[in-house]
Image (spheres, coloured by chain):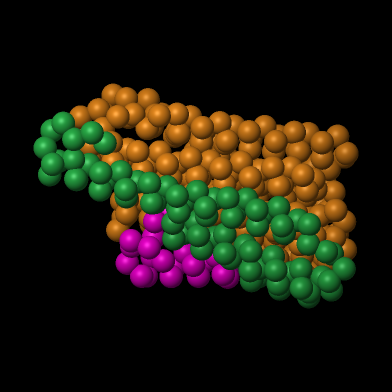
Chain colours: A green, B orange
Amino acid sequence: MDCIISHAVCTKLNEGDGLINSNTRRVTIIWLMMLLLTLAVVVLPRQQWLMMAVSVWLVTVAKGLWIIRYFMELNRAPLIWQRILQGWLILTVSAVTMTAIRQL
Amino acid sequence: MPGDLALWFFLCAELAVFGLLIIGFCLVRLQYPEMFYHGLQQLHMAAGIANTLVLLSGSYFLVLAVERVRHTDTSPGGYFFAAAACGMIYIIIKISEYQQLYADGYSLHYDIFFGFYFFTTFFHLLHVLAGVVLLLLTQAWLKKKKNDQLSRRKGAESVAYYWHMVDLVWIVLFPTLYVLS
């Protein structure tokens, strides 16, 4: 950024740009990984059902935790709120996966 | 704490309702494994994948929108519109999936599986629709509130967190209905 105001103001503005860029880069990588994992889960071999179910559990929990932490920004919230949402995620995904495994 | 505390209580209540529906689905699936096996085979995997991708993309655009609202005084660009467009695509895909199932003879009253399927996904669809309306209203509201940075930030964050909650629910519904079938 061209410094036409003052050095101090410019430094602050550039710091702000840096924050936006680093956060945007991280969120973009997470988004792309979530898209890839969604597609990866679909092409998992169905013959190894147990392994597939465990992989689906891992991928779904990973995607959910990223959403809770980086999209909902609960990494900036008190721990109790993170735990409530993480608990909900793990409980529901585990229930779904265990039900599917029981029907092997 | 990001956003408003009341909003988080509301989001947790919503998650509790969806959580009960998902766990109820699992319990009934254990009792009627063959019915659920048959029902899950009728769902369209491609529609499930496409819906997951568009909802995740909508969430991504909203993170960028909130970032812009926080750090600049200018408009959030087309990010709210982009997220709303993702929501609209989700709705179109879901309705076409309903039409296909209906044409095949499946409806809310067909059996317990389809009762659960239509009720849960339609309930989720209504949340997406509400999200789309909120996104479009927020985009218009942000244009009016150019000088009130605190309100702008709070408004944008609240809508974004609601949308992420809807996305989070779908993240769990996708393997429940399409992958672990």
Tell me which segment is drawn in magenta: A72-92
- In this rendering, the answer to whether B119 lies above or below B30 is above
Q: Is residue B93 left or right of residue B106?
A: left
Where residue A70 sits, quadrant-wise, is bottom left
Q: Is residue B114 left or right of residue A93?
A: right
Magenta span main SS: helix
Where residue B175 sits, quadrant-wise, is bottom right
Q: Nearer the viewer, residue B111 or A88?
A: A88
- In this rendering, the answer to whether A96 lies above or below B64 is below
x and y, in percent, of residue A63 in the image? 57, 59
Where residue B63 sits, quadrant-wise, is top left
x and y, in percent, of residue B116 in the image? 71, 53
Residue at x 33%, y 62% (from the top left corner)? A77
Q: Is residue A90 magenta?
A: yes
In which quadrant is the N terminus of chain B drawn?
A: bottom left
Q: Nearer the viewer, residue B111 or B9?
A: B9
Count the numbered circles shown.
0
In which quadrant is the C terminus of chain B drawn?
A: bottom right
- Would you say residue B92 is visible in this rendering? yes
Q: Is residue A85 magenta?
A: yes
- Would you say residue B14 is visible in this rendering? no
